[in-house]
Image (cartoon, rainbow, N blue to C red):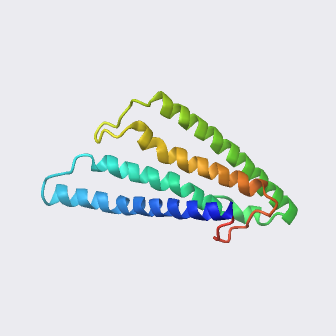
Amino acid sequence: MARSWTWLERILGGIAMLALFALVVFPSVQVVMRGVFNAPIMGLEESTRWGLIMLVFLGTPLLISTNEHIRLAEFVDLLPKRLRLALERIILITSGVALLVVVWSGAQSILRNIGTRTPMLDIPFWVFAAPMLIGFAVAAIGCLWIGLRRADPPVGSGKPVI
């Protein structure tokens, strides 16, 4: 599992990095084209939106694997060790189940809107929503794996734990 997770982490990290690059470059190009040449590029806003979707949803598993997601670590770390570990396991397992519900709902939404396309670039809805489905599915697996394995959940060292 550790080797597979590392491989998956690199792929998702690379895609998230490209999405972040797109979030910087696309609006800059649009500003220059609109302001300097008075010729905006049609669909660039939609491409930027898709880049943001990819960055957020494909980056989520990376935060979970390093235990750097948003949490109240200041309070949790003050708890006695056994209580803290039990609480972190409960939170991880509950989060994994909740993410699986979101994945199920997202899959149902994609199936219901399978023929729908985006207005400007005519991207199929399933392609537009796929980063959410993939990112949350991987995040759910990561939460459940960390929560159910025998090793203690990390405190938040920034190092991958899977």
Residue 129's x, y, as percent? 46, 42
Counting the numbered discs, the total is 0
In the picture, measured across the screen, residue 57 lies left or right of residue 79, that is left
At which x and y percent is residue 14? Answer: 47, 63
Q: Quadrant of residue 68 in the image?
A: bottom right
Residue visible at 24% across and 56% down in the picture: 30
Q: Is residue 152 left or right of residue 114?
A: right
Q: Quadrant of residue 5?
A: bottom right
Between 26 and 109, which is closer to the camera in this rendering? 109
Q: In the image, residue 108 lies at what x, y percent?
A: 54, 31
Question: Can residue 88 be seen in the rendering of this structure?
Answer: yes
Q: Quadrant of the C terminus?
A: bottom right
For this orientation, the residue located farthest to the left is: 37
When the figure is inspected, residue 8 is found, relative to residue 122, above or below; the finding is below
> Residue at point 42% right, 53% down?
52
> What residue lies at 21% left-to-right and 51% top-to-bottom?
41
